Every structure is written in structure tokens, then in C-alpha cells.
């Protein structure tokens, strides 16, 4: 009997350690976590060395730890793609010289298709880690357990352990239909000029020609962002570095979603931060700060953002930490291909109320029902509101709202990003756009993106141009006619690479280089085959 009890106790102990420190839920919405206590001094010294490094190898930051029954070996480099070359940071009315060297992106070593993104501040990593078995989130412990003496500095939890009960509640996440009807009427009230260019509507028959045209030119596929944060957002995250880290994680999260979506032939849509304005707690008393008041409704909050001129940006957002009525997490103007104002690339215009406004705007909050939502929920909220700007209304109809289906299989897959109420992000469809959204967004992109989108400055597999890091580029699977080249729909380790024993046909120089590479490979293979 004693032996049986001992075995039982051992099993309970092992279960406790596998399920996290004491097995305690982390917050109202996070039901399980584990603590992390890796060497902060070591990570901080790596970060400082990476900042000063001249060689690419020295710029790599390595972080290893064990959690949730597996080993994590992160390899990251400074993320320079998220911020434009002319990036500007403004705090308390002053423009600052500021680098973003604490923002990193990378992968899990040896795990193809993984993605890790976050920041390193005071020797602590904060961010998300996408694996083949779901996404993990890492945050500082003081954000949740400030008054508790615990032997770790960070917490890590899996997306499956996020429980967000409001996702099917009334009005949870986005504003109700009456708000959108009012916004729609206002968008139509723009004071038209007497003379304006005639709008041309693109027929569906032209889409193939447009795709071919895009393949022969450098793609303007990047939406540049202006993001402001109010004093309440700063108060919660406590520092400039932490605020910028939150902005970068939100932008990186939606960047992954939009880049991974084919909008009827328009691909590789990405985002870049052009400007950040941080309102600190001292700005709460600044009369020039439109967001200084404590009690502002969600519609008024969006209006305050829209009253500024945002002509220099694709989209302009404000991040806040406010508990809006009815559980609203975000609000944005819905774009349209023609007929009304609002959405991406929209310019400052005069409306029937006598005010000039920019309707390329939106807002999100990280607080809901007196609790802070997990980053996963906030990231999807941001993707949802930007989806409105890109031209998608809320999903409707059985095909685009499978979470409401009577079929258990469809219901288990969950609703898509543009569902009217917030999702926790743990269902298969929660991070995807429905066919309804894809159709609406593609029409707006076709019509408007050319007026304000910019080149990313990064190699793009699938644009038909052979760029650094690519062996070939024949486009996507529906475009590729080259039998020697892997198309852009292939896995990361194969796309835009030559198939075995094939030579690049794009240039003589390319063919010569690849011939030399293949010769060297054969020589190494021959040497290895005779090694002991």
C-alpha cells in the first residue's frame, strides 16, 4: 500500500512540474503557465554584443531554455524590416534619435517554418514563438504576479491555454451594427470636388493580366503605419522600450497573417512602421494631447484619431489601455473600392459636418471587462480592425461563419478573423480570412493600394524577379512555367530554389555560378564518401 501511495505521489509531482509552477492560472484568461529563469546577464551581454557587431554571425542572439516538456533553442537577429529607413519616434512633443536594436526576429534552431519575434530589454525576452504545435507567448512575470515572490523572471504559456469566454458573447470585440451604420453614413457624407478623375472599375477578366503585369515589376506591397499610444497604454507597459516592443509584436503578428494570404492573386502584403508617437503619463496634463481625458467612448476615441491629418501614411492607429463599453476591443473605418471614403490610403477630406478628417484610421485597446487581454487576442483584434480598413465588413453567411454551424466538425474549426465578435485565436480558422473577406479585400487592394503602398525593400519570392538569396523565381504555383524552379507556394526551405540537377536559365552569370556550386558540391560529396 505504501509503495502504491509513493508511486501516486511521484506521478502527482511530475504532473505538477509538467503543468507549470504550482499549476496556477496566470490570469482571468490564461489558465496555465510555466516560469522561466534563464541567465538574464548572459542574454543582456549577447544583446549588447549584437548591437555593436560588424559581422553577421556576431549579430545573432541565442536563447535556450526548457519549458512545456520541450527544449527551445532560439536563433534571432535584429528585425530591421519592421521599421522604415526614415522611421521617426516622438515622445512628449520631441522627436528622438532612437534605434530599434532591441527588436529581434528569427526561428527555432533546426525547426523549419518556425518563427520567433520579440524584444530583449534588461536581459529578458518578451514575444511569441510559433512552432508546428502552436504558438507560445513569453512575458515578464511582474505583469501578472507583481506582488508575489517567485523564483523566475518570465512566464511562458501556450495559445491553447488561453481561455477567452467573451468571444461568443453579445457585442464582444467589435462595435455593434448600429455603430457601423452611423460610420457608413458619415463616410458617404464627404464633400465631393466639382472635378475629379473618373473611376475605373476593374473587371474580373482583367485580374490575370494584372497578375502578369505585377510579376514584371517591383511590387509595392507594403502598408506604412503611424502608431500612437496614449498615456494609459504607457502607464501599463511602464517604459518606452516596452511600448515599442508591443507595437512591433502587433505589427509582426498581422504581417505574418497578411503575407500568408493570397488575395486573389495579390500576395506578400506586408506592414512597416514609419512613425511612432508615445504619450507618456506626463502628457495626461498636456492640453494639446487629444487623448488626455480619462473617460472617452470608443467612437469619440476613433474620431479624435481621425481629426489629425494622416496623409503621409497608409494607416494610422492609436493603441490604448481603456475598458470601452460593451467589451469593444477595437474600431476602424471600413474601406471600399469606390463610392465612399475610408480605409487604406484615404486622404484628409472635408465632410458634411464641416470638419476635415482622415478616415484611414483605427484604434485598439488591450483591456476588456476590467482585465487585460492576452497578446494573442489583441493581435487578432488588430488584424481584424486592419481587415476593416482593407475593405472587409464582418463575415456573414454559413460559408464564412462556420463557428455558428450545427455541424460539429465545422464548429470545431471556429470562425475567421472578420467574425463580428472577438476570438481567442485557438481555433483553426481564427488566424485566417474567409473567402468573403478575401474577395472584398482584393477589390480594395486592386483599386487603392497603388496610391500609397511602397516597396518593402526586401527580396520577395513569387514576384518573378531573381533577388539576393534566391536561385530562381517563377512566381506562384498558378503562374510558374519553369520546370527547373520550385514555385513560391513551396515550403520555406525549397521555394525559389532550383530543383536538383537543374541550372538557372535567367542569366549566363547565374548559370556559371550555379555550375561552380554544383561542381563544389560534387567534390565535397566525393570526399565525404571516402571519409571514415
Image (cartoon, rainbow, N blue to C red):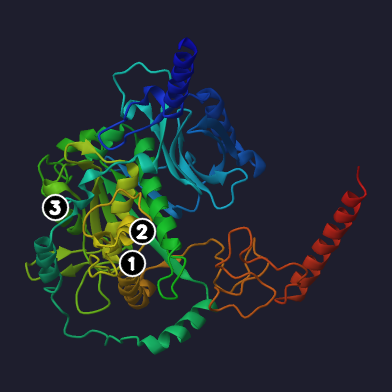
**What mark, if any, has residue 170 been given in the picture?**
3
x%, y% of residue 404?
A: 23, 61
Residue that badge 1 annotates:
434
Q: Are marks 3 and 2 in contact (CB under 8 Å)?
A: no
**What is the secondary structure assignment of the residue under circle 3?**
loop
- In the image, is 159 to the left or to the right of 478? left
Crowd band around label 3 with a 10 angstrom C-alpha radius: few (<14), some (14–19), many (20+): few
Q: CB atoms at circles 2 and 1 under 8 Å apart?
A: yes
User: Of the residues under marks 1 and 3, which one precedes in the sequence?
Assistant: 3
Q: Crowding near pointer 1: few (<14 within 10 Å), some, many (20+)?
A: many
Quarter assignment of residue 258: bottom left
Q: Which label's residue is closer to the chain start, 3 or 2?
A: 3
Of all residues, the one furthest to the front in this rendering is: 1
Residue 512 can be seen in this image: yes
Q: Looking at the image, is 114 positioned above or below residue 411? A: above
User: Which structural element holds mark 1?
Assistant: loop
x, y percent for residue 61: 58, 37
Q: CA distance from mark 2 to mark 1?
A: 8 Å
Q: What is the number of the mark on residue 208?
A: none
Residue at the spot 51% in from the left edge and 25% down from the top edge:
38
Who comes first in sequence, dot 2 or dot 1?
A: 2
Q: Is residue 211 left or right of residue 407?
A: right
Residue occupying the point 31% across, 86% down: 201
Residue linked to disc 2: 429
374 and 120: which is toward the camera: 374
Amino acid at each position: 500500500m505504501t509503495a502504491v501511495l509513493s508511486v501516486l505521489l511521484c506521478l502527482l509531482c511530475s504532473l505538477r512540474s509538467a503543468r507549470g509552477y504550482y499549476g496556477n492560472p496566470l490570469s482571468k484568461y490564461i489558465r496555465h503557465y510555466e516560469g522561466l529563469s534563464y541567465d538574464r546577464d548572459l542574454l543582456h551581454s549577447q544583446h549588447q554584443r549584437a548591437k555593436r557587431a560588424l559581422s553577421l554571425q556576431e549579430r545573432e542572439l541565442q536563447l535556450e531554455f526548457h519549458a512545456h516538456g520541450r527544449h527551445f533553442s532560439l536563433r534571432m537577429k535584429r528585425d530591421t524590416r519592421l521599421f522604415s529607413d526614415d522611421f521617426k519616434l516622438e515622445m512628449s512633443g520631441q522627436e528622438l534619435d532612437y534605434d530599434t536594436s532591441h527588436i529581434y526576429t528569427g526561428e527555432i534552431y533546426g525547426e523549419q517554418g518556425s518563427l520567433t519575434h520579440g524584444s530583449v530589454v534588461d536581459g529578458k525576452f518578451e514575444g511569441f514563438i510559433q512552432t508546428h504545435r502552436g504558438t507560445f507567448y513569453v512575458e515578464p512575470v511582474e505583469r501578472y504576479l507583481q506582488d508575489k515572490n517567485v523564483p523566475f523572471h518570465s512566464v511562458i504559456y501556450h495559445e491553447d491555454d488561453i481561455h477567452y469566454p467573451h468571444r461568443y458573447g453579445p457585442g464582444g470585440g467589435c462595435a455593434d451594427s448600429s455603430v457601423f451604420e452611423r460610420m457608413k453614413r458619415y463616410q458617404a457624407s464627404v464633400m465631393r470636388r466639382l472635378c475629379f478623375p473618373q473611376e475605373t472599375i476593374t473587371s474580373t477578366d482583367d485580374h490575370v493580366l494584372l497578375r502578369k503585369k505585377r510579376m514584371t515589376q517591383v511590387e509595392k506591397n507594403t502598408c506604412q503605419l503611424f502608431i500612437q499610444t496614449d498615456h494609459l497604454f504607457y502607464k501599463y507597459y511602464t517604459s518606452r522600450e516596452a511600448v515599442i516592443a508591443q507595437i512591433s509584436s502587433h505589427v509582426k503578428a498581422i504581417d505574418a497573417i497578411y503575407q500568408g494570404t493570397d488575395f486573389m492573386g495579390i500576395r506578400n502584403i506586408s506592414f512597416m512602421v514609419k512613425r511612432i508617437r508615445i504619450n507618456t503619463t506626463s502628457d495626461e496634463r498636456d492640453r494639446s494631447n487629444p487623448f488626455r481625458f480619462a473617460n472617452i467612448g470608443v467612437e469619440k476615441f476613433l474620431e479624435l484619431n481621425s481629426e489629425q491629418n494622416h496623409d503621409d501614411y497608409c494607416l494610422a492607429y492609436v493603441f490604448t489601455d481603456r475598458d470601452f463599453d460593451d467589451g469593444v476591443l477595437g474600431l476602424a473605418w471600413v474601406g471600399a473600392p469606390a463610392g465612399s471614403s475610408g480605409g487604406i490610403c484615404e486622404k484628409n477630406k472635408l465632410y458634411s459636418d464641416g470638419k476635415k478628417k482622415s478616415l484611414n484610421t483605427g484604434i485598439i485597446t488591450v483591456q476588456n471587462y476590467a482585465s487585460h487581454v492576452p497578446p494573442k487576442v489583441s493581435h487578432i483584434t488588430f488584424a481584424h480592425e486592419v481587415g476593416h480598413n482593407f475593405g472587409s465588413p464582418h463575415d456573414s453567411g454559413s460559408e464564412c461563419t462556420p463557428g455558428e454551424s450545427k455541424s460539429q466538425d465545422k464548429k470545431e474549426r471556429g470562425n475567421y478573423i472578420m467574425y463580428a465578435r472577438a476570438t481567442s485565436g485557438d481555433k483553426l480558422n481564427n488566424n485566417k480570412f474567409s473567402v468573403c473577406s478575401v474577395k472584398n479585400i482584393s477589390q480594395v487592394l486592386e483599386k487603392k493600394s497603388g496610391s500609397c503602398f511602397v516597396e518593402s525593400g526586401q527580396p520577395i519570392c513569387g514576384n518573378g524577379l531573381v533577388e539576393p538569396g534566391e536561385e530562381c523565381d517563377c512566381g506562384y504555383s498558378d503562374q510558374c512555367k519553369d520546370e527547373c524552379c520550385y514555385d513560391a507556394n513551396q515550403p520555406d526551405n525549397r521555394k525559389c530554389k532550383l530543383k536538383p540537377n537543374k541550372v538557372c536559365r535567367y542569366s549566363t552569370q547565374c548559370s556559371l555560378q550555379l555550375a561552380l556550386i554544383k561542381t563544389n558540391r560534387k567534390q565535397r560529396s566525393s570526399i565525404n564518401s571516402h571519409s571514415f
